[in-house]
Image (tube, coloured by chain):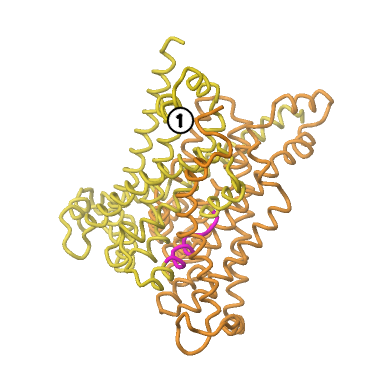
Chain colours: A yellow, B orange
Amino acid sequence: MHWKTRSRLTGWLLGILTVGFLLFQWAPMFTMFTLSFAGENGGTTFPMNGVSLHWYQKLWEADLFDDFKPPMLRSFLLALGCSATTVVLSVCAAQAMRGRFRGNGLYFYLLLLGLMAPGILVGFGFAILTRLLGIEGTWNTTAYVVHVSWALPFGFLTMLAVFNRFDPKLEEAALTLGADRVTAFRRITWPIILPGVIGTALFGFSLSYDEYARTLFTVGSDGTLPLAVMAQLDRQLTPELYAIGSVTTAMSLVVIALCSIGFWLRARALRGRPA
Amino acid sequence: MSTIRAGSPAAFWLALPAGLWMVVAVVLPVLLIVWVSLWGGQSVSPDSPITFDNYAHFLANENYRWLILDTLGQAAMIMAITGVLGYCIAYFLTVKLTSPGWRTALFLAFVIPFWTSTLIRAIAFVPFLGVNGLLNQLLISLGLIERPIQAFLYSRLGISMAQVSLYTLLASGPVVYMLSSIPPALREAAMTLKAPPIIVFWRIILPLTLPGIVIGQVLVFLNVLADFITVTTVGGNKLAFLGNLILLFYEGSQIRSTAVVSVLLMILMLAGVAVALRVVDIRKLGS
């Protein structure tokens, strides 16, 4: 066989493998999504027994025991707080890295540690810490601290990458023209790094919103959405869980789509501007 | 010259909040786990004498020793599968696929699930793998099997399928990054010198992407070792790995045993990372 034929053949084989894996990756989510529209007597597997919005309606009118709305609100607020904090800390930390302070090599590894340390260990360790200090864990104190420590390394790496590609001549020009450092940062640096900042905010939000292990150990009595979902799964698997799963997945997808559109619009606006 | 002066005190003060946050939320808790795992005596308190008895006690149990091996075995299996699969996908997306539109579309289809909840994705495997699940229906309608396979759900097979689905991106991502940073001229040079494609791959492409492979393998290793969510949701309560044992002990308020398993898990992870660092220098990746 000629090597070109063979090369094309490998291409097709790898292509089939890739598409096969993608189907395998999406099929469970698709199953969950479909079954969330099951009829009133529908079970958690096929056949569907009718098509309805019953389970979404049940989600909305939930009674005390399986009401997902308060945990969802807590998760949302926690994710917002985590996102804002991550942005501030990551930008400061990455800007500091440019200033090459003493021990910045060690500092880099310190921040990466949060990426390597598994949630189950961080959560458990933090639970010990709060217990020794006699602090009661809640979703907006202890869980918040741990969530930020999870999102921070991702934000930090994003911002480092952004600053790596950043052209310092632009700042130099501003400083030479008499701007002080704060003004130069606010007027020149900040607008340029803004896409990276949005990426960091997105990391901060979605990592916190989906976090389970770290929350489990640190949240106290009022849980977040992933905990409520897991608790419901322990009690009974109903199509209602599929409905909530579909809702949160759809929400994540909408957030990604909005950010992508934002990036695209910005890129187009920048291209259209005269140089 | 930039908005921050090299070695200025401002840099130090800017670095401080994030550094302190990580010390309080990650370093200190991990050190506390090590300390608690050494507590001995009757009462569980900071006044306890320091001892290695907890470890001796834990490791004396044959079931627990087996569980450690079992967890490592599971990790090795998932690493092998996601490694090969992830490399094939990365190679197809970056090298074989030439249409930019298709590349973006398939790449997005590959990455987007990563941004959604792992827990939800794991739960979604229940109706997919179940007796009346999509997979069984598909296999029956294709005539491959006659009766639904029960062993998909609440079994090691099911857990492994879910883990492969969840972690292949981790193995693949770093390889995509390494592959796309190889200049095309290298391949062309080798081809001009009459190297057959298989040799080009084996002697040039593979060595250049090795750091990516290793990083991906480390990520998968760490994630499988610490994974307890997939194991509980897809595996039911029939199976347990080290992560589940941590949770089990914690729920039983056995703080010292929880700490012991946590430290063992930590040691396994550090050993894995150390082995990986001997193969590649992670710091060179950024340059």
Report x, y in % for residue B224: 55, 59
Is A155 placed left or right of B264 in the picture? left
Residue A12 visible, this angle: yes
Is B189 placed left or right of A245 in the picture? right
* Residue A68 sits in quarter: bottom left
Judged from the image, the secondary structure of the residue bearing numbered disc 1 is helix
Measuring 61% from the left and 76% from the top, which residue is drawn there?
B66
Viewer-closest of A182 and A254:
A182
Is A172 placed left or right of A130 in the picture? right
Quadrant, the N terminus of chain A: top right
Above-or-below relation of A88 to A162: below
Viewer-closest of B36 and B164:
B36
Report x, y in % for residue B230: 46, 61
> Which segment did they paint magenta?
A116-126
**Residue positioned most to the right:** B193
CA neighbours of label 1 inside 10 A, class few (<14), some (14 to 19), many (20+): some
Report x, y in % for residue A7: 70, 31
Residue A156 included in the magenta stretch of the image = no
Prevailing secondary structure of the magenta residues = helix
**Residue positioned most to the top:** A274
- Kindly identify which residue carries mark 1: A193
Residue B133 visible, this angle: no
Is B233 placed left or right of B95 in the picture? left
Viewer-closest of B188 and A219:
A219
Measuring 31% from the left and 43% from the top, which residue is drawn there?
A251
User: What kind of residue is marked 1?
Assistant: Ile
Viewer-closest of A172 and A154:
A172
